[in-house]
Amino acid sequence: MSDRLSFLYPEISLFIGTCVVMVLGLSRTLKMRKASALVAGLAIIVAGYFAIASTPRSGDALCPISGACYAKGVSAAAGQMLLPDMPLFAKTLIAIVSLLLLLPCAGTVDRADESAIARGTRSFDPLRSNRAEFYAFFLFSITGLMLCASADDLVWLFLALELTSLPTYIMVAISTSRNRGREAAVKYFFLGALGAAIFLYGFALIYGGTGSTNFNVIASVIRDQGLNTITLAGLLLAILGVGFKIAAVPMHFYTPDVYEGAAPQVSGFLAFVPKTAGFISILLLAAIAGWAYAPGQSGLGGLFNPAAVTPLRQSADASQLPELLRIMLWVMAALTMTVGNVLAILQTSVKRMLAYSSIAHSGYMLVGVIVGPGDGRFSHNGIAAVLFYLLCYGVMNAGAFAVLAALERRPGKDGEPREIETIADLKGLCATHPQLGWSMVICSLSLLGLPPLLGFFGKLPLFTAGISANEIPLVIILGLNSAIGAYYYLRLAFTPMLEKPDAGAEPIEFAPFFSRRVGAMLSAGGVIILAIFGSPLINEATKAANVPVATPADASADPTDPNQAAKALTPAPRISQR
Amino acid sequence: MTQWLLILAILLPLASSLGVALAPARLTKSVAVLGTLAALGVTLVAAYVFGWENPAVMQLGMEEPIRWIPSLGLELQVGVDSIALMLVLLTALLGPICVISSFSAIKEREKTYYAWLLVLQAAVTGVFCARDVIFFYICFEFTLIPMFVLISLWGSTNRKKAALKFFLYTFTGSVIALAGLVYVAWFNTHKGNGQAFWTFNIDTLAATARGMPLRDQTWVMFALLAGFAVKVPLFPVHTWLPLAHTEAPTAGSVVLAGVLLKLGTYALLRFVLPFVPDAVVTFAPLIAATCVVGILYGGLICWVQTDVKKLVAYSSIAHLGFCVLGMFALNNAGIAGSVLYMINHGLSTGALFLLIGMVYERYHTRSMKELGGLAAKMPVWSTFMVFFTMASIGLPGLNGFVSEFLCVMGTFQSSTAWGSGIWHSFGHQVGTTRGELGPWFAIIAGTGMIIAAMYLLYMLGKIVWGPLKVPGGHDSHGHDSHGGSDHGALPTDLNLREIGVLVPLAVLCIALGVYPKPLVDVIREPADQIVKLANQSRARIGVVPAPKQAQAPASDRAPGAEHLPGAEHLESLDADMSPAATPEVPQ
């Protein structure tokens, strides 16, 4: 039992942190209240430590959760996870990036209250303080995200996804005191519920088609009996619904409004956390079907003939998703990046532009999902590319939003400092606030994918993987979109650097929270450092993308017996890294 | 020690850029000059220790490549052959010239200016030194940022549009080129020599790419052209160039014309020709046709310009048309001419931009309508102007002539079909080289040389000779009185600093014009290799019927196959041509 728990140590430590934060945030003394952010950070660090130290890898004889097992050989009873090595990398990257996202969150919800208390105009009122909730929801959402990474069951995945997103609705609502934030939250909530309904429906269909909610069992049923129509429809719906989390076209409509309505640090959070949850889920759902079909197999005709869509794992050519799934993801990827980039060009608001850019980046990553594990080497491995890109995107995106969070304009009529709205507000930032200005330049050039910054090394594996899977048209679209992206990222990079502030423009100032500046600079530093010394992380991403291949013995397994069917799974031989 | 020379040549400008950013403002210029001079010194030492007896061998590399991201096959390695080394030398030479020539022109945000200028030099040097596709690409792309900043901060009125257009054009193209290069790298692991790991080593990839079927080669070639033809720029994708050149500050134009355009031609030479010779041989007439169109089109547009700087900018399109035309003649004369053209164009056009910048600093106009007869007022300037214009036109005795002549001659010789028939009937041996272009290309391109003479002499006639005309009737001193004190330091004619900047270029123009043999000699061997590859392709795909004994057996398709029996005979003929082509010029 304790073995199984060790798998969940990161989540458990986050949960303990959440409880402590809830209490601390309501303390009467300022010091104790301030400690709540510190505790949140500590909880994330501890979770990160446990993610590295106690997450098992394939080959460890641990049976952590709900029967899924990191079996040594085939002896373990219940088979193993579909992506057995992903949790380690995913949880580590989540811990790293969420630390970067936490730093700019200082003073998000209770700034006015705290200053009123400091002035002595009011005494502390626990009922009016949101600080505890904000940090608690932050940690809850991260907990859900980490749970997503270790999901091996549809129900688990659904609950984890909801645990990730529900707190974000509230975070959007309380992040600003303006009505815009509330409007954004309501919009986000309703559309999020729609998305959840769609993928839940998909989950139900998958269950209906295969008779199980366990990923291993579903996968083995598909492997043995073929992909029947209901299961395929379920997979399509599930991925479409999860597309809401990653803001993929056609589920992207909420993104600009919500990002604009929320405080920038929360928008940064939204651009990473639900997106990561979505990509992990999409990878898991795609792994259920498996990248084991020949090109063209299970096209429309396959809808009505399950036998035609049996995975052909033994064939060397069979390394695609089922055709319908591939087509859907292909179209989603192409549309998502194009729509995101083209609409981003038209924006004048920084946050809306970054929102559309976040849509575009989802499109890039979908290329990796389509490619799948390839032959396991990093350069052919779309899954590794996605996981590494998530890290890259998380860091550079956190930096861009942290810069926005660290700046503000003079208070408006309602006495509250206003945030940076348009790109024109950033004019001359490199001269007036060099640290933040240069952080913005570095992060946006990296988002553009300009070598030698981190974004380029994130995009390069997507290129190599796409080409090695012969998805050349998609790679060309990806390349052209990078070029379209140049148009608006250049504006974002060079407005702070080259332009002079307009005469009579209102000055921008530091928001009075040092940690926001630290967050921006750390992210910008990370963009450079990881680009130079990123090789170990790339190796880890490659290991994380290991997809076990079923042995030929599977054919004899009885599909009706889940346990027996799952037995036949063996871990794939790890491809050695130079 | 020698293994660090190229690294130093890249890092010194970078370090001095950092120095410029950190040093107090009064030291800015000194640090920049010192940095570029140090880089020039290092490059000269590199040229001294370079083994000129093996000019085609990549030299001066590190003993062990730096393994950057092994799982992607990313390794950093530097190295130059004679062609790359010459371009590195050109870059290093233009470095101090650009810095020194900017002293009076750049008055605001000096630190930023010099820092980015130095970064640009480092990136360009990196491109020429790269032995690894990704390192090449990183440097290739990174040249965009400093150039963007230089244009959009210190350019003229329309600078923002120019900078953006420049960036987007080049970036879009090079992303597609990257896709092509990655495709080759994938082919290398997938179907090539069975290597388990990716590599981006240029030589390995070149060997693999040559083994690709024609269809793949064609795709790769067009992907690469998408990136590099924009940079050159070739005819249909040239539209960013006039704008960027015209709007850029003087030193920016010098770097742009001097070395940045050479990135494109160098990349064509380093990637397109050795990677996909089959496709190149197949499509050479098409590419040559765009070059010829570019030559005529660029020339005709020059003719109607009134802005001197724009005129020189458009002339670059025509000139680089010659350069690429010679390259795609795919024989020794053509390629040697093409490489020389890269150097010569950098020297003479760079100098022309400097001269125009000097006039602009004094009169704040570049319009031929407002300027005239400057010979009377600025005799030294006019002397240099006439000199470099002549070099640009291709006056025999100056550098432009040698390269232009070699390019056109290479094009002329590059034929077998009816061209050879005609010339055989006159008893000439001209047609014995194999090739795809032939006399028609050369004749039409030759018209471009006449047009070049017309528009450049027309320009000279307008602004150097004729009645004196300066803006607003002011002479330069009168101008100073109302123009503020910032230009007060400039005398009517050139000062010593400006002369000092121009003299090295002038000396090189004469030297390369009178005695280009050393350069032609060291280019021959690398050019030979490319011609050899082209000849193999010609025999293989049968675009040009090979001589009987040169029928390549199927096994020769392997990338390693070196000599075709008939090829040597032809090559020796080629080789005989090029020294003969070296003009023995009086003076």
Image (cartoon, helix red, strand yellow):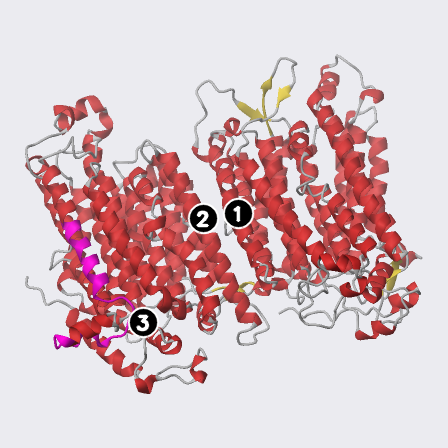
Q: Residues within 10 Å of mark 1 (few under 14, many from 20)?
A: many
Magenta region: B425-453
Above or below, comparing residue B341 to residue A337 in the picture: below
Q: Nearer the viewer, residue B413 or A144?
A: B413
Pointer 2 with pointer 1, Cβ within 8 A = yes
Chain letter for the residue marked with disc 2 in the picture: B
- Residue at the (83%, 27%) spot, across then down: A26
- Residue at the (5%, 33%) spot, across then down: B467
Q: Nearer the viewer, residue A540 or B200?
A: B200
Image quarter in which the C terminus of chain B is found: bottom left
Where does residue A48 sit, x and y in percent of width and height?
75, 49
Above or below, comparing residue B404 to residue B525 in the picture: above
Classify residue A264 by image quadrant.
top right
Badge 2 is on which residue? B171
Q: Residues within 10 Å of mark 3 (few under 14, many from 20)?
A: many
Q: Amino acid at mark 2?
A: Phe
Q: Amino acid at mark 3?
A: Pro
